[in-house]
Image (cartoon, grey):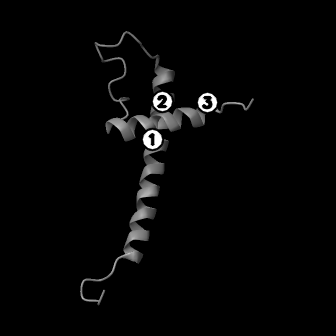
Amino acid sequence: MSRVKYRELLLKYIEHVASCEGITFLDGLNEDAASEVRFNGAEVMALRQLEDEYEANLAERNARLDAEFAVRRVAPDEPR
């Protein structure tokens, strides 16, 4: 059985939630009246660091895709 790398798992889950819902839901930690789950300061900081890493990875991936698209795009005045 393979070992789970929990840091990578949390990053993957943050990406999954953001992809499905459009947000990570980390902004409202400890403020959501619908949830009784509370996080201590260290936990909030750790989750925020993971969210920052996710956002940096997303920005890097988007920049790479934008660059790839720009290379493939045909200029408007060129024949197709």
Reading the chain from its start, which is encountered first: label 1 or label 3?
3
Quadrant of the frame with the N terminus: top right
Q: Residue at x 33, y 81 (%)?
A: 74
Reading the chain from its start, which is encountered first: label 1 or label 2?
2
70, above or below 50, in the image:
below
Left or right position of 45 against 79: right
Q: Position of residue 3 (x, y in %)?
A: 71, 30
Left or right position of 72 against 7: left
The quadrant holding residue 18 is top left
- Give the Cα distance between marks 2 and 3: 12 Å
- On the image, numbered disc 2 is attached to which residue? 47
The reply to whether the C-beta atoms of the residues labelled 1 and 2 are less than 8 Å apart is no
- Give the Cα distance between marks 1 and 2: 9 Å
Q: Residue at x 52, y 38 (%)?
A: 12
78, above or below 13, in the image:
below
- Give the Cα distance between marks 1 and 3: 17 Å
- On the image, numbered disc 3 is attached to which residue? 6
The quadrant holding residue 34 is top left
Regarding mark 2 in the picture, which secondary structure is present there?
Answer: helix
Reading the chain from its start, which is encountered first: label 2 or label 3?
3
Amino acid type at circle 1 is Asp
What mark, if any, has residue 52 been given in the picture? Answer: 1
Amino acid type at circle 2 is Leu
Q: Residue at x 65, y 33 (%)?
A: 5
Q: Nearer the viewer, residue 69 or 57?
A: 69
